[in-house]
Structure formats: C-alpha cells, structure tokens
C-alpha cells in the first residue's frame, strides 16, 4: 500500500483522472475496477471515480508495486496499447481469435508493433493474466499462423501447458481446419482432393507445387467442395489435411484456378477485373477432435468454432449463408 497527500496542483481533479496521471502504467479498465473494489481509498474510505479531490486529502492505494514503476517504452506500451481483438473463445489456457486480413501475426521486416501477438499480449497484460516482469514468466504464444492478408481463426496459448498440448494436437492432426476461398473459374469436379508436393523458396517467400517428390518438398493434401458459382467465380470450402506454407493458394493456382485477388500466385489482370487486391481466403471454422488425452484442454474436445462473417462471401456471393 502506498499513500499520497493531495497538494495544491492536484486539488479539484477527479479521482480517476488523478489516478491515471499518477500511475500511467495502470490500464484504465483496471483503475476503474480498483476504484469499485475500494482498493483506492480516499480519507480511509472508498470513493466514486468522479469525486473531486481537495487539498490535504489522504489517498491510500492498495495496488501492485509494478504499476508504480517509472514508465519505460516497454512497460508503458503494454499498459497504453489498445488491443483490438475479436475473441471467439477463451479459457484459462487457450484463446481463439478471429484475425482480420492485413494484420501480421508476428513482427517482421514490415511491421514491428501492430501485430496479432502484440494485441494478445497487451490484452492479457491489462487483464492481469500475464506480466513480462515476473521472473521466468511464460509469454503468450501463437499455435498456428495465418498469412498477413488471410483472415481467420488463430489459436493462442496463455500458458505453457496450453501451448505444449495444443502444439501436440496440431502435430497429431487432431484438429480440423476449414477455409473458405474464391477461385477463378469453375472447377472440373465440384468436390475432390488436391494432392502434390510443395517446395518452399525461402528467398522468394514463395512455394512451387509438383506432382512428384523432390528433394526438400513436403506432401500437401487439401480436400475441397464447391459451394456456389457466380459471375465466373467459385466459392469453395477447403479442409486442410496438411498445413504447408501457402498450401491452398499454390495448389489451386497449380490446378489452373488461382484464388481471387492473389497477386503472388494468380493473375493481376483477372484480379483487376473484380477489384480485389489480396487473396480471398479465410480460415473460418475450427473443430477439435481429440483422439488422445488432452489434459487441461479436454473441455475443447468435440467443440467447433466458426466466424460470423467473411467479407468476400458477402461481397461476391450476396445472400450466401455460412
């Protein structure tokens, strides 16, 4: 507990505004909560947030020491950053977030601050569920990645146990991941299987697809089903059997039906016709189908989660219901 005496310069201020100025590392929602819980006492008693302070008032703050630290670029950032997340599910160990297209998941050469993991860490820090200042603290981490311009469900681990178990479930393919995409043209078969070998070029950050094995290439398998056809485009649902880099984008392009808006694997001329500047691809549904012990994540078994809306479905296939 720390005590403060209100001086001349602070007299007349609202309690909540004085608290924000005095403890800049204390997130505003948490400050309001502490006032409600009477962990901020005015002259020995609880007070409302809008009460005006008077010179000589005694303020007693029953607040963790970390919020009294001197602001640094790192700790001020976590407190002041305003996380923007669409949360589909959250428990003690796992967070499922609907990532918007255009947001990178991790810092890279183009963006260091506005990333999905930054939003998640700031969100959990401000909820008092994680702090990087505790010795040996686990840092929230992502269990899967999605390209910058692809939207959809990303799994984040809030605990080391959650990360360990979820990563193992992903490796053992005990999750089903479904994507929606729009491809140019009409597929020769309304449903089928795309299978081949993907070789990644790290320098170009691009992959190539071949029908035969090559040194360094990995097997890639995608199941697909055409849901609708309109105006020279097909709305397709895909299930990833493997999860290779750019798998859906590269495989459909290799099959002669690149994704709408895909500038890396598609046709700029075709994309301009439809006014789409990035790939129409969304990880829209996730199902947990555990076949082995899941420990702390057992409550997720049998559950499925789906986003409410996908922008390109609404735009190019109006009236279609997910």
Image (spheres, grey):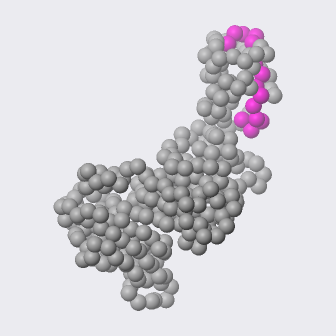
Q: What stretch is highlighted in magenta?
A: 53-67
Nearer to the camera, 202 or 98: 98
Residue shown at 32% from the left, 78% from the top: 254
Nearer to the camera, 170 or 303: 303
Residue 159 is situated, as x and y percent measured from the top left of the image, at 68, 55
Residue 54 lies in magenta, yes or no?
Answer: yes
Q: Is residue 87 depicted above or below 281 in this figure?
A: above
Residue shown at 81% from the left, 28% from the top: 1
Q: Relative to 139, is 307 on the left or the right?
A: left
Residue shown at 20% from the left, 61% from the top: 230
Residue 140 is situated, as x and y percent measured from the top left of the image, at 64, 54
Observer able to see residue 14: no
Residue shown at 39% from the left, 71% from the top: 248
Residue 303 is situated, as x and y percent measured from the top left of the image, at 54, 57
Q: Is residue 41 depicted above or below 72 in this figure?
A: above
Observer able to see residue 209: yes
Q: Is residue 160 depicted above or below 200 in this figure?
A: above
Residue 30 is situated, as x and y percent measured from the top left of the image, at 65, 33
- Dividing the picture into quadrants, the one containing residue 233 is bottom left
Work out which quarter of the rendered image holds the C terminus and state it. Answer: bottom left
Q: How many marks?
A: 0
Q: Relative to 203, is 74 on the left or the right?
A: right
């Amino acid at each position: 507990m720390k005590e403060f005496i209100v001086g001349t310069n602070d007299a007349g201020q609202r309690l909540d505004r004085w608290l924000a100025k005095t403890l800049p590392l204390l997130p505003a929602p948490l400050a309001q909560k502490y006032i409600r819980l009477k962990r901020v006492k005015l002259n020995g008693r609880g007070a409302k947030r809008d009460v005006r302070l008077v010179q000589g008032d005694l303020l007693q703050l029953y607040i963790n020491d970390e919020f009294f630290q001197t602001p640094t670029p790192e700790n001020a950032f976590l407190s002041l950053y305003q996380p923007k997340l669409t949360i589909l599910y959250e428990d003690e160990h796992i967070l499922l977030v609907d990532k918007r297209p255009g947001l990178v998941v991790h810092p890279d050469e183009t963006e260091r601050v506005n990333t999905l993991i930054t939003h998640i860490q700031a969100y959990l820090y401000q909820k008092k569920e994680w702090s990087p200042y505790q010795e040996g603290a686990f840092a929230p981490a992502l269990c899967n990645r999605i390209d910058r311009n692809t939207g959809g469900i990303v799994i984040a681990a809030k605990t080391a146990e959650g990360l360990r178990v979820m990563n193992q479930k992903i490796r053992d393919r005990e999750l089903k991941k479904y994507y929606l995409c729009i491809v140019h043209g009409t597929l020769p078969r309304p449903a089928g299987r795309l299978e081949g070998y993907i070789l990644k070029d790290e320098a170009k950050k691009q992959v190539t697809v071949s029908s035969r094995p090559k040194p360094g290439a990995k097997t890639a398998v995608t199941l697909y089903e055409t849901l609708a056809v309109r105006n020279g485009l097909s709305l397709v649902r895909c299930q990833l059997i493997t999860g290779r880099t750019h798998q859906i984008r590269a495989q459909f392009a290799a099959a002669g039906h690149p994704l709408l808006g895909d500038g890396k694997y598609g046709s700029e001329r075709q994309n301009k016709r439809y006014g789409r500047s990035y790939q129409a691809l969304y990880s829209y549904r996730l199902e947990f189908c555990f076949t082995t012990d899941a420990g702390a994540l057992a409550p997720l078994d049998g559950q499925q989660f789906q986003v409410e809306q996908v922008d390109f479905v609404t735009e190019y296939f109006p009236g279609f219901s997910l």
